[in-house]
Image (cartoon, rainbow, N blue to C red):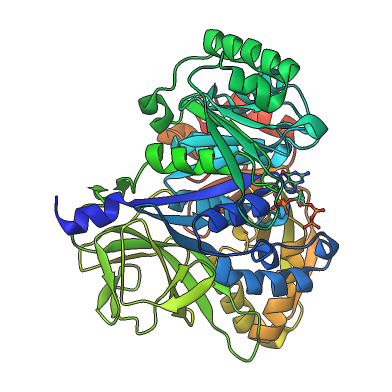
Amino acid sequence: MSTYSQEIDKRRTFAIISHPDAGKTTLTEKLLLFGGAIHVAGAVKSNKIRKTATSDWMEIERQRGISVATSVMGFQYKDYKINILDTPGHEDFAEDTFRTLTAVDSVIIVVDSAKGVEKQTRRLMEVCRMRHTPVIVFVNKLDREGRDAFDLLDEIEEELQLSVRPMTWPIGMGERFKGVYDLFSSELNLFKVDKQHIAEDVKKIDSIDSTVLDESVGPSLAERLRADIELVNGVYPDFDRERYLRGELAPVFFGSALNNFGIRELLDCFVRIAPSPQPLQAQEREISPHEEPFTGFVFKIHANMDPNHRSCIAFVKICSGRFERNKYYRHIRLDKQFRFSSPTAFMAQKKEIVDDAYAGDIVGLPDTGNFKIGDTLTEGELLHFKGLPSFSPELFQYIENADPMKQKQLIKGIEQLMGEGVAQLFVNQFNGRRIIGTVGQLQFEVIKYRLLHEYGAECRWEPIHLYKACWIESDNREVLDNFKRRKAQYMAHDIEGRDVFLADSGYVLQMAQQDFPEIKFHFTSEF
Ligand code: G4P
């Protein structure tokens, strides 16, 4: 195998997803600690949007600014290069998270052992399912009283529509939590509580019947563990890596991120089973990560909120080949050559200028408005990467110009902000009015502020009551045209010029689906 291919195979690019507060930040930090990328806990916390700030979007943006450096955290563990892509926990930035999921090869889902599967987790899992992303589940906070492990596994199977296979099993819970038993290596991992560093007490036992178990955790917990393990082995299928890679079977780990319980088992298994960079589909053909010419796409744009320096960082996922500093690449949408003198990569918490990076890695390219979400870069080949769908927004408002002298600025501002993926624009085909769709209320405030401060344009919001935006398609052209005529008032174009039906209620949508069975209504732009 070429050294080039070896580099690619070493890479594990993934995201940790969870409902806010389940422990994503804490787990990220502990993984970095194990990887030796940081030395004391607490370092990643600045990355998190603090709860006090949830209603103050300026503060959130400021904190998001801090988090640029930790948007991607790369570190070396054993012989692997691990890239963790950070996903904003805040619900209003769910769209950011959806897009980040298009740039990873697998995910770890964190579930709070007391709360089980929560709303945001369900939503994010839907996106993973669409893409058949392999999933590992980490059940967290076993040091607190939580729910019965079997109940939790049932809930995960049902709610996330996945088969599960426990890889470790908790010994006790809450105050009586003693550690975890590794079902595959038959290791008993009894940990000392140490929130700052890694402290472990690993005992290898020959079998679950070993008396060492009784001595270590006491006879009653030992008995309980034996009974549990018998049940686990009887009820759950064997771990099958192929099924995991197809996104059908999720290995499950138990532990406490805060106390370093069960993290090493998770990480060791992760590097062994998680996929290296996978082939990606472009409109023209499938691209293998092992192809030598560089290709990549922009999945995230992070704007600097400082009005005096309108600059962004475009995050590029490298899909194939080697990216090199100062080499000319073709920006497909603009059909122009660009070279980048200061691409950054992210090792641990440091953002550094790099000379090269490989498929699976993420590079940050400083930008002044040349990039939009979804843009492709290549060494010359005409390619368009697919797979960055838009999702139906949850909230909608008309955007109106509040300063007639600044119409041009307003249009330009809207176009650029939409290109960054801040929100979605729909233009009503009937009256030409512009409608902005977002996932959360915060975005409306962000847009208004940024239009004014970065583009000198003033906007005004006007209410519109809409339920969902649906991308429509049909093999029957006539039926489609008929539908569009009949629903003319509710038809819009998205930023790509695609037909979108704006349903104002669930009932209207249901009726439309009934009346037009030949039309498919999609809640995402890619189908
Ligand atoms: P998030 O990124 O998913 O939103 O969650 P985060 O890691 O910030 O964790 C949320 C809260 O849960 C934090 O407490 C964190 O300390 C706590 N936590 C994480 N893992 C565990 C665990 O294994 N056991 C217990 N008992 N708690 C855990 P906080 O009080 O909100 O924040 P902090 O002041 O402790 O930082």
Is 139 placed left or right of 478 in the picture? right
Could you tell me how many numbered marks the image carries? Answer: 0
Residue shown at the point (51%, 34%) measured from the top left: 129
Image quadrant for the C terminus?
top left
Between residue 429 and residue 160, name the one nearer to us. Answer: 160
Q: Residue at x 28, y 82 (%)?
A: 326
**Farthest left residue?**
1
Q: Is residue 207 above or below residue 520?
A: above
Direction from residue 404 to residue 239 in the image, left or right: left
- 268 vs 370, nearest the viewer: 268
Above or below: residue 176 compared with residue 211:
below
- Give the residue drawn at x 74%, y 21%: 148
Tell me the quarter of the picture where residue 196 sits: bottom right
Residue 392 percent across, percent down from the top left: 62, 46
- Seen in the picture, residue 201 relative to 277 is either above or below; the reply is above
* Residue 391 visible in rendering: no
Q: Give the percent coordinates (x, y) of residue 359.
A: 31, 58
Taking depth in this image into account, of 475 and 312 the one nearest to the observer is 312
Q: Residue 237 placed where, x, y %?
A: 48, 14
Nearest the viewer among 371 and 269 is 269
Q: Position of residue 389 (x, y in %)?
A: 49, 49
Q: Is residue 444 visible?
A: yes
